[in-house]
Structures are given as C-alpha cells and as structure tokens.
Image (tube, rainbow, N blue to C red):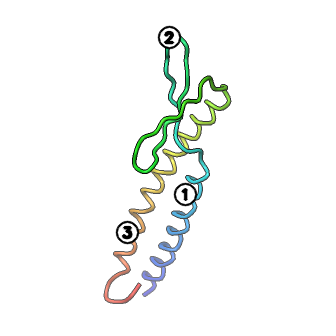
Amino acid sequence: MAIKGILREELENSLKMKADYERELAKLPRGSLAKRKIKGKHYYYLIYREHGKVRSDYKGKVKEKIIREYAEAKKYRAKYRHLLSRVKKEIRFLKGALRGKEDV
C-alpha cells in the first residue's frame, strides 16, 4: 500500500506540472515571424493557426527587439511542448499503474 501512496503523490505532482506548462505556453505570443524578401527588401509576416488553418498577417518592417522576442518565444514554446509531452506520458503511466482492482 505504501507504493500506491507514492504513486498517487507522484500523479498529483505530475498534474500540477502539466497545468504549469500549459499556463506558461499560454503566456507566450501566438505564432512566429517569417521573413520574406520582396523586390530586394525584407518584410515580416506573423504566421499562426486559427481554426485549423494557417494564417499570415503582414507586419511590414519589424524592429530587431520584436524579432528577438519571437525567436525566444519559439525556443520556449518548443521546450514547454516537449516537457508537456513527457509529463502527459508520465500521467498516463501513473494512472495505469494505480488502476488495479481499486479505484484511483
């Protein structure tokens, strides 16, 4: 029975971590910037998904600070999605391990 208690505690921690990762992902700006060269000049578009379709909004010339912010957000988004994927697998495993003949 001690093992089940430890597994339940680990499941609670994993559920909290999942909520934290989802909250952090929601804080990040939506989409990413794409640079396009038109007639020798560079212009930027914000690329994002909306209702299952890829959308792009023209942003024109963008300041370097905003470009860095979107590049950093892209790194964090990848990091949090990876962590979220791992914690979801862990939750699935823990729920299965606790299932047994007793209710979770």
Rendered location of residue 85, percent (x, y): 42, 56
The N terminus sits in image quarter: bottom left
Q: Which quarter of the figure has residue 60? A: top right
Element type at marker 1? helix
Is disc 2 surrounded by few (<14), some (14 to 19) or many (20+) residues within 10 Å?
few
Look at mark 1 in the image and give the residue it sits on.
21
Residue contact between numbered discs 1 and 3, judged by CB atoms under 8 Å: no
Q: Nearer the viewer, residue 71 or 104?
A: 71
Which tag is nearer the camera, tag 2 or tag 1? 2
Is disc 1 surrounded by few (<14), some (14 to 19) or many (20+) residues within 10 Å?
many
Look at mark 3 in the image and give the residue it sits on.
92
- Disc nearer the start of the sequence (2/3): 2
Look at mark 2 in the image and give the residue it sits on.
39
Q: Separation of disc 2 and disc 1 at Cα? A: 42 Å
- Disc nearer the start of the sequence (2/1): 1
Q: Residue at x 35, y 81 (%)?
A: 99
The relative height of residue 52 versus residue 57 in the rendered view (above or below) is below
Q: Residue at x 32, y 84 (%)?
A: 100
The three-letter code of the residue at mark 3 reads Arg
The three-letter code of the residue at mark 2 reads Lys
Element type at marker 2? loop
- Disc nearer the start of the sequence (1/3): 1
Q: Residue at x 58, y 41 (%)?
A: 73
